Image: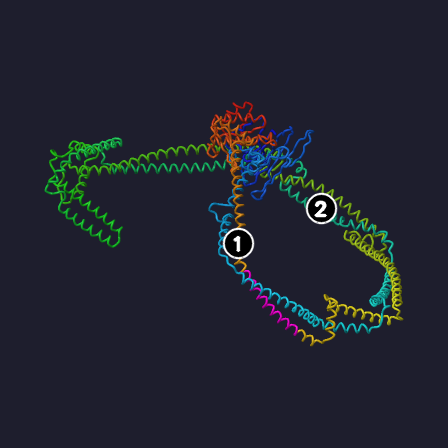
Amino acid sequence: MRLERLHIQGFGGVQDKRIPIEAPVTVLYGPNEAGKSTVLYFIRAMLYGFPGKSVPAERGEPADSGVHGGELRFLDDEGTLWTIRRFGQPSEGSAGSRKERVHIQKQAGDGTVLELGQYDLEREALGGVSKDMFRQLFAISLSELQEIRSLQSAEISGYLFHAGIGGGANILEAERRLTQEMDKLYKPRGKVQHAAKLLQSIEQLKAEVTESRTYVPRYNEVIDAIRETEDRLERLELERADTAEDLTLLRKAIDIRPLWLAWREAKLELDGLPDCGSFPPEGAARWERIEEELLQLEAQIQRIERALGDTEAKLADMPRLTWLEEQGQRIEDLWGKRSLYEAGNRELAQLTAEQTAQADRLAGLLRSIDPGWTEAELLALSTSAAEREEVRRLGAAFAGYDRRMEQLSLELRGAQRAAVAAESELSEARRQLREEMERGKENFAMLKPRSPQETAMLWSRLQQTAERWRERRLSQALPELKASGASEHGWLPSAYSGLLAVMAILTVVLVSFLFWSGANGAAAISGVLMLAGMVYVIWSGRRNVKDSPSRESSPSAGEPGGDDAHEVEQLLSELVSSPYHAAAATLEYRGSRRAKTEARPARDPLAVEAQLRELRSVMDAWQAWRQRLDRLTSECLSAEEKVKLQAAERSAIESAIQSEERRFVQLERQWESWLMQRLLPQSLSPDAMLDMFSAIEQGQEIVRQQRARAAKIAELTRDAKAYAASCLELAQGEQDPERNRESLTTPDAILSLLGDLHRRWKQYQEASAQRESLRHRLLELQEEAAAADEARSAVLQRKEQLLGLSGAADGEAYLRMGAAARRKEELERTVRHHEITMFSGLGSQLRSQVLQLLESADGAALEAMLKEREAADASLAELRDELQERRGRLLQERESLEAAGNRDSANQQLEEQRAELKELVSQYAVRAIAAGLIERTRRFYEQEKQPQVLRLASRYFSKLTGGTYSRIVMRMGDHALLAERPDGGLVESAKLSRGTAEQLYLAMRLALVQSMPHAAGIPLMLDDLFVNFDSRRLGYVLELISELSHSRQIVMMTCHPHVTDQIRQRIPGAQVIVM
C-alpha cells in the first residue's frame, strides 16, 4: 500500500490543502500549529472514520462550521488505485454521535470503478488491521509511543509470544492454580484447610472411642416394646379401614338420597308414557319451521302483488319528451360553458373599468410631468440606463456639493468658535501672568538681586556657608558642654526639676490605676504621652541652661566659627534688604524668653539661626512663585501659537468654500442644458428627475397595457356574442310562444333561459332514470312472484312427507305425538343425569350396596347409623395417636442408645480419616513438585526462548542504542519489558531514561509491524517521535528507517530543523514538504 495524494478540504485548522506523497520517505516539516499532527489525524479519519465528539482534536471539526473532511488516494499491493472521500455531517446528537458521508472507490484493471464499503476497505487494502492496531503501530504520535499499555492489548499480545503456549498465559495459569490447590490442601498455620479439619476430627474420634460404654440390656427392652407397639398399631389400622368404608357408604347414601328420589320418580313416569317409535327425529321442530316458512311465503306473495300494482301505475304516469332528448347534449354543452361566459362578462367589465381608470391615471401622470405633454412625447423620452446614470451622476455631484458645503460650514463655525476660545484663553493667560508678576514684586520686594539666576546663586552660597558654620560651632561647643556639668546651675533649673518629679509620680500612679481597672490600651497611651511630656520638659530645661548669661563670653574672643558667621551675615545683607533683616531679628527676639528684654549681640547664633529659618521660608515661597511664573509664561506662548493656527485654519476653509461655489455654478449650467435638450421643465432637480423616470416608465407601461387590454376586450366581446347567439337559437327551437328574441338581449336573461332549459333537462333525465328503474323493478317483482309460488309448493310437499313418516292422520295428531316424544326425551336425559351424578366413580359392587342401603332405610335411620360409626372411628383415632406417640419415644431412646454404644463405628471412621489424610499428603507432594518444575520451565523460557518478534525488536534496539543494550526481554506474567546490557544485566523500562525508553518502544513497534504478514506494505506514520533523541541515536534511527523504507512507505512529521537536516543527509531520496 502506497499513499499518493491527500486533499484536506476541511480538517481542524487546515483548509483546502493538497499534499502529494511521492517518495518512500516523506517528511512534513513546519512550525507548531502548521497542521502536521492534523495530517496524521486526517489519515486516520479517512481510513477508519471520524472519531466521536469526545475527542475533538482527533475529530478535526473546523471552527467555522465549514466543510469537514476530504479525499485520500493510495495504491494497494497490486497497483490498484483506491479513492476515499469522507465528509462529516453536522448533527445535534450526543457527544459520541458519528454521522458521516463516505465514498470508497476502487478502480479495477479494466478501468471500471467499484463502490465498496468500510469492511471491504479494511479487509482488502488494510489487511484486516483494526482501527486500534493502526493507531498503536502504524500511525503513532509521541504520546502514543510512550503508552506501554498499548503493547499489552490482547490483539498485539498474540504477535509477541509463541502460539503454542498462548503468550505464556497457560503456564502462569497452571502455576497459579497449583499454588491455590496447595493452599487449599494445607497451610502451616491454617485452620480452614481440609488437612487441618481431618486432624481435628481424628482427635475427636479417639476421645469418643475411649469414653464409650455398654448399653445392651436396656437396648433389648426398648426393641421388644417397639415391636409390641407396632403390632397393636397394625391391628388398629385394619379396624379403622373397615370403619372408614362403612362411613363412606353412609355419607354417600345420605348425600345422594334427594337425587335418588327424583331418579325413581322419573323412571316411573318414563315407564307410563305411550310408544312413539315411528315419530321422526326432531319432528316437532321441523313441523314448526315448515309452518313458519308457509306464513312468511304468504306474506311475501301479498307484498309482491302490491308492489307490482304500484310500479305499473307509476310507469303509466311518466311520458317521453322527444325534443329534450334531441337537444339535451347541446343544453349540457352550453351549461358547461356558462361559467366561462360569466367569467368573460366579469373580465370584460373589469377590463373596461381598468381601461377607463388607466386613461385617467395616464392623463394625471402627463399633467404631473408637464401640462403640455402628450402620449407621443411620453413614448419618445428614453429611460435607458445611460440616461439614468447621467442623471444619477449629476445628482451625486449636487449631493456631494451639498455635503461638502455642509461639512465646510460646520468646519468654519467650529474654526470660528475655536479662534474665539483661543483668544479668550490667551487673554486669560496674559491676565494671570500679569497678576502673578505684580504679586511677586509685592511679596518679594526685600530681595536685592534683580535677576532670578543671581538670587538662586546667592541663596545656594548662603546655604553652603551656613552648613559649614553649624558644623564648626558644634565641634567647638563639645568641651564647653562637658565643663558646664560643674557649674552652679546644675544640668536642669530647679523649676524644671520639680516639674519633672511631679510628672514622673503622676505617670506611675495613672498607669497603675488604668492597668488595675483593666483599660490596658488606655494605660499604654497615657504612659507614652506622659513620657513625651517629660522629654519635652528636659529639652526645655537644657535649652534654658544654654541660654543663661553665665555661659556667654565676648563675641570677639570666645564665639566659635566667627569667620563663617561673618560670611553668613554678609551674604544675608547681599541677598535681602536691611528692613527685612531688622524684622527677622525682631521676630527672633519675640520667640525667645519673655523674661529677657535686652537685645542680643549682632553675632548671636540663635539670632542667625532664626534669620536663616525665616529666610528659608521666604526663598521656598520665591522658588514656588518662579515655577508658577514660568508655567504661566509657557501657557501664554502656547495660547498665542494656538490663535495663529486657528486663524490659518479659518482662511483655508473660506478658500475651500469659494472653490466649491464655482464648481456648483458649472454643474448647474450642465444640468439646465440636459433638461433643455429633452424638452423637460427647467425647475426639475436630478433627484426629482430620477423619481420622474419611474413615473415615465409607469406611463409608458400604462400605454402598452391599454393597447393589450383593448385587444383583449374585443376578443371577449366576440366570445360573448357567439355564446348569446347559441342560446337564442336554442330558445327559438323550443315551442314556447311566450319567449321572443327581443326579450333575450341581456346576459342575465340569456342565463335565465339557459338555466330553465338545463333544469328541465335535468328533471327529465331524473324522470327517465326513474322510469328505467321502475321497468327493471317490474321485471324483478315478476320473477320474485314466480319464485315465491315455487317455494310455497316445495314447503307444502315437505309437510305432507312429515305426516306420512309419523303415520298421523292430520296435523293435530302429529302435534300430540310430538309432545309425547319430547317428554320421553326429557325424562331419559333426567335419568341419565341423575345416575351420572349419584354413581360416578363407584364400582358395581359399591353401587349395589348404596342402592340396597337406600332401599332398606329412610333418612333418619341413615343419620343415626352415620353418627354411631363416626363415634367408633374417633375412639380408634385417639388410641392410634397414643400408640404412635409411645413408639416415637421408644425410637428416640433406641437411637440415643445406638449412638452412645457405637464403638465399632467410631473406630471405622477413625481409620477412614487416617487414610484420607495420607491421600492429602500425597496430593500436596505431587503439586509441590509440579509447581517447582513449572517455575524452572518459565525461567528457562524467559531467558532462552524469546519469540521472533522480541528477537527482531532486540536487533532494532541494539542498533538504535549503538550497542549499549544487546536485547529486549519480556517477563512473563506482568509482561514487563526489560533491557539487557552486554554484560547480562537487566534494566526495567521504567528505569530507563526517557529517550532510551522511547527507543525501546519504537523498536518494539517496528518489530511488530515487520512481523505481521497480512499488514505488509501498510505505510508507517511517525509524528515527531525523535524530540528526546540525541544526534548520534537520531542518526541510528534514521538509518533504520531508511532500511525499512525499502519494504513500506514512511511519513514523518517534525518541527525541528536539525531533524530535517539529518534526514536530508542520511536519506538522500527523502521528500521534504514544508507546511
Residue sitting nearer the eye, 824 or 346: 824
| In the rendered image, the vertical position of residue 80 relative to residue 777, given as above or below | above
Task: Residue 89 in the image: state x and y as whole percent.
Answer: 60, 40
* Element type where label 2 sits in the image: helix
Left or right, 624 with reference to 34:
left
Residue depicted at x 54% and y 22%: 1068
Q: How crowded is mark 1: few (under 14 residues within 10 Å), some or many (20 or more)?
A: many
Task: Residue 333 in the image: state x and y as whole percent.
Answer: 80, 49
What is the number of the mark on residue 529?
Answer: none
Q: What residue type is labelled 2?
A: Leu
Residue depicted at x 11% and y 35%: 554
* Element type where label 1 sits in the image: helix
Q: What stretch is highlighted in magenta?
A: 867-896
Mark 2 → mark 1, Cα distance in angstroms = 131 Å
Q: Mark 1 — residue?
A: 906
Q: Mark 2 — residue?
A: 351
Question: Is label 2 in contact with label 1 (beta carbons under 8 Å)?
Answer: no
Using the rendered view, name the quadrant where residue 273 is placed: bottom right
Task: Residue 336 in the image: state x and y as whole percent.
Answer: 78, 50
Left or right, 501 with reference to 1051:
left
Does residue 1046 show up magenta in the picture?
A: no
Q: How crowded is mark 2: few (under 14 residues within 10 Å), some or many (20 or more)?
A: some
Left or right, 702 with reference to 36:
right
Does residue 884 show up magenta in the picture?
A: yes
